[in-house]
Image (spheres, rainbow, N blue to C red):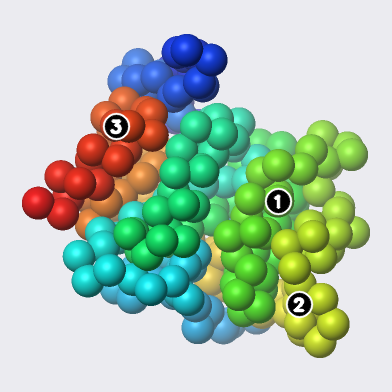
Amino acid sequence: MKSNRFVVATVVAVLAIAAMVGGAIWSSRGEDAPPTAQQTPSTLLSGTQAVWANPSAPIAAEAPVVEVFEDFQCGHCHDLEKVLGPTLRDLAAQGSIRLGYHMMTFLDEQARNTASRRAAIGAVCAADAGTLQAFHDGVFATAAADAGQGWTDAELRSIAQQAGVSGSQLTAWDACVADQRYAAYVSARTSEPWKIKGFEGTPTIMINGAIVPIAEIASPELLTAALAKANS
């Protein structure tokens, strides 16, 4: 497993992600088991393989494409979400960015569980119901009852419900998860990013197709400035 040092700094009571140059990024090249279903999500962000977080937002013509690579069991992804998550969500909701998530699952191998994989599949199924962002945020905000095993199926279903999946959509979500509809997609998103030049692990953020060092966007202000530059 590759690793660099990752430092989280607190400035004026605001948690900011400090430079990852010499900081720790969880990484691995492990792949998931062969999937039992082979379907491509219909919710992909145009021009990418990321699941689109804000397809219903009134997207500005110049809105940059922001792709976030995360593993739900990645501790530093949790740090990034605490710092940059609210800004990314707000900008996406406003249509100021086109936000997509690549949900990787390589940490299952290290944790010896299947929590990342099941959460990732649940997230793509939630995207079908238009609730990807809420489900994504819910997983990162919810501590599993058994940290070693990660979220149970029941816990993930509860997160889906809290994200607004209900009625016939919940029935569809249950079926989507049960038949492993997006297992092949999730497996591909775990293996393919390693082919990207400069990709070293999670979290990673790309703006308009280029990886941006976390140190350069380690606070909401720096992120906003980088996005403005991408528009110039």
Q: Nearer the viewer, mark 1 or mark 3?
A: 3
Q: Which mark is residue 13?
A: none
Left or right: 157 in relation to 40: right
- 142 and 153: which is toward the camera: 142
Q: Position of residue 22 (x, y in %)?
A: 35, 16
Q: Residue at x 70, y 51 (%)?
A: 138
* Residue matched to label 2: 173
Q: Position of residue 189 (x, y in %)?
A: 48, 61
The residue type indicated by label 3 comes to: Leu
Q: What secondary structure is found at the residue carrying circle 1? A: helix
Q: Residue at x 79, y 60 (%)?
A: 162
Q: Is residue 131 above or below residue 153?
A: below
Q: Is residue 106 above or below residue 96?
A: above
* Residue matched to label 3: 222
Would residue 13 be visible to someone looking at this image?
A: yes
Q: Which mark is residue 138?
A: 1
Left or right: 44 in relation to 145: left
- 88 and 195: which is toward the camera: 88
Q: Nearer the viewer, mark 3 or mark 2?
A: 3
Number of numbered markers:
3
Task: Give the mark, 3 or 2, whose residue is nearer the N terminus.
Answer: 2
Q: Residue at x 47, y 67 (%)?
A: 54
The residue type indicated by label 2 comes to: Trp
Q: Residue at x 66, y 73 (%)?
A: 125
Task: Give the mark, 1 or 2, whose residue is nearer the N terminus.
Answer: 1
Alpha carbons under labels 1 and 3: distance apart: 25 Å
Q: Dot 1, how many residues are within 10 Å of its Cα: few (below 14), some (14-19), or many (20+)?
A: some
Alpha carbons under labels 1 and 2: distance apart: 16 Å
